[in-house]
Structures are given as C-alpha cells and as structure tokens.
Amino acid sequence: MAATRRIRLLLPLFGVLLVLAGCATSAAAPLDAAAPPSPAPPTTASPTTSAPPPVPELPGGGHTLFPGRTMVALYGHPGVPALGVLGEQGVDASVQRARDLADRYAPLTGEPVVPAFEIITTVASSAPGADGDYSNESAPEDLVPWVDEAAAAGMYVVLDLQPGRSDFLTQARRYTDLLRRPNVGLALDPEWRLRAGQKHRVQVGSVDAAEVNAVATWLADLTREARLPQKLLMLHQFQAQMIRNREQLVTDRDELSVVLHADGFGTRAEKMETWDRLHQAVPAGVTWGWKNFYDEDRPMFDPADTLAVGPVRPVFVSYQ
C-alpha cells in the first residue's frame, strides 16, 4: 500500500516534469534547427511568341509575280466549250493542255513559264435572272476541284468576272475564300459590266476607274492580311472607253500586280492596232497581257509572234 501511494504521489510530479521538458525543448528548437530558406522571388514567365507562318510561294517560286515569270493560260468556263478552250475537256486534260502550251513558250522567254487557268467565274447572261443582274455566278464550291488540281500541278488560276448590272466588288467578295489561296488571282472584264438599261451584245460595257480601285484596295488588303504572295489583278480591254478615267487607276499597291490585257481579235493588223491604241497614256506600274483566239484570229499569232509584239512583251498570254 505504501508503494502504491508513493507511485500515485509521483505521477502528478512526473507530469509536471514532462511539461517542463516539453517547454524547454520548444524554447531550444529555434537555436538548434536550420532557418527555413527565404522564399524565392516571384518569376515572371516570358511570354511565348510564335513566329507568323511564312508567306507561301507562287507557282514557279518567289513572292512577286512579274518580272520573273510568264503565264500561259487556257480561258473559258468548265464544261462549256462555247465559252473557250478551257471548257473543251475535263480538269485533268485541261492541266495537260495548259502545260503543253506553256512548254511552247519556255524556250523563248529565258524565265519560268507557268501554266494557268483563266476561269470565267461569273458569266454574262442575256436574261436578267432571279437577281436581275444579267450574270450567272458560279458556286465557289464548284470551282474548288479546278483550283485544287491547278495547285497540285504548280499552276496559277485567275477568276474572271463578267458582272452584268452587278458591280465587280460585290462579285469578287463572293469568292473571298478562293482568293485567300496563294495561286488564285482576279480578272475584271469591263466588256460585260452593264449600266442601267444596257444589255449584253447591244452595248459594249465599261467601268470607271473608281470601281476598279475599290476592288484593288479590297484585294490588296485581303492579300496583306492573309499573308499571301503578290496577287494578280487583270483588266481586260479592247476599246479605250471600256475603262473610263484609266489614268486614275491605282497601281502602286505592292500586294498586287496590275495587268492590262489586250482582248481584241481579228486580223494581225487589227490586233496590232488595238494593242498600239491601248498603249497610249498608259498608267504607271502596269504590265501587259495578250489573248490569242483559236477561231476568230486570222491567223492566230504563234508563241514567237506573241512575245515579239513590243514595245514590251506580254507577261500573261491566254488562249480562247
């Protein structure tokens, strides 16, 4: 009993000693433990900036159209032989036919000769149609196979507009997605641009330079924003009045190469008369195109004759 009582008396004392020991240990800890490391200064993550994708090259290489290459094109509308030689065969045969034509020019130029399609994308119509504009607009998706095959073959494509009583900019915007491709350019054909009350084949159409400039501004901006190589803007002409105020054409946008395309047919003398007349009071900064007609020219110029027309040779030759 005495031992038990002694143990009971010691238990409270033992507890007190444990408490005191714990306090002593806690007080000594800061002296014995290593100091915690100072927090690292906040780091600012450097922003990850990705370089913009490179500008794609043109068929034939590079980013500038002319000088440096010649284009030789089949002109027409797919599946419609009456509208030009492009429509006389399917897409694969058209690729080969365009290549064969380009091969005839290659020994004569000293530079790459790029085969091309010039596709009549909106076709002048004798009837007003549901929208009243005397123009039949191709669905963009119907042209995709031609553009795809041309791209795969290293060819250029020009979308040609015959707007009737619509305007060129309205029609061009319809094909924005196609024009975002690096191998696709645009052609405006004022012969088929009607004013109110006019009809095709009754009057020869015309366009004012202001309307052309609106298209040029839109197309140049699209080319810059989409980071595309220089884009072709071609203007067909065979009469002076077809492009009113031609001296006011804007031709200084680096994103575009503006080509005046002589579109007349007939005898050699008639074609050269048209060519010489179009060279009067030429706006600065344009290059030249020429069209050969299989059926209407008498006789049709061969490649050597075509390139020798002077005073400067055409850089874009199309065949209808």
Image: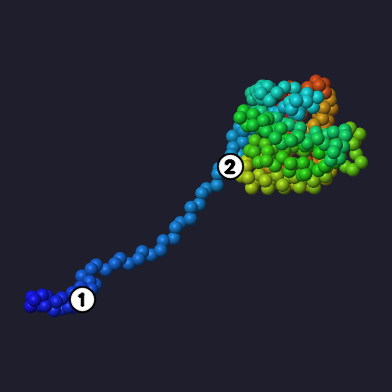
Identify whether 100 is placed above or below 187: above
Structural crowding at the residue carrying mark 1, measured as other residues with C-alpha within 10 Å and reported as few (<14), some (14–19) or many (≥20): few
Q: Position of residue 194 (x, y in %)?
A: 86, 40
Among the 4 quarters of the image, the one containing residue 262: top right
- Answer yes or no: is residue 259 visible: no
- Answer yes or no: is residue 42 visible: yes
Among the 4 quarters of the image, the one containing residue 60: top right
- Tell me the tag on residue 278: none
36 or 12, nearer to the observer: 12
Q: Position of residue 228 (x, y in %)?
A: 62, 42
What residue is pinned by disc 1? 19
Residue at image location 74% in from the left, 41% down from the top: 174
What residue is pinned by disc 2? 55
Q: Position of residue 138 (x, y in %)?
A: 76, 34
Structural crowding at the residue carrying mark 2, measured as other residues with C-alpha within 10 Å and reported as few (<14), some (14–19) or many (≥20): some
Q: What secondary structure is marked by label 2? A: loop
Q: Quadrant of the N terminus?
A: bottom left
Q: Position of residue 171 (x, y in %)?
A: 77, 41
Compare marks 1 and 2 and give the one earlier in the sequence.
Answer: 1
Q: Are marks 1 and 2 in contact (CB under 8 Å)?
A: no
89 or 310, nearer to the observer: 89
Q: Is residue 132 left or right of residue 309?
A: right
46 or 227, nearer to the observer: 46
Q: What secondary structure is marked by label 1? A: helix
Identify whether 5 is placed above or below 166: below
Residue at image location 72% in from the left, 47% down from the top: 217
Residue at image location 23% in from the left, 73% down from the top: 26
Q: Residue furthest front?
A: 1
Q: Amino acid at mark 1?
A: Val
91 or 266, nearer to the observer: 91
Q: CA distance from mark 1 to mark 2?
A: 79 Å
Q: Quadrant of the C terminus?
A: top right
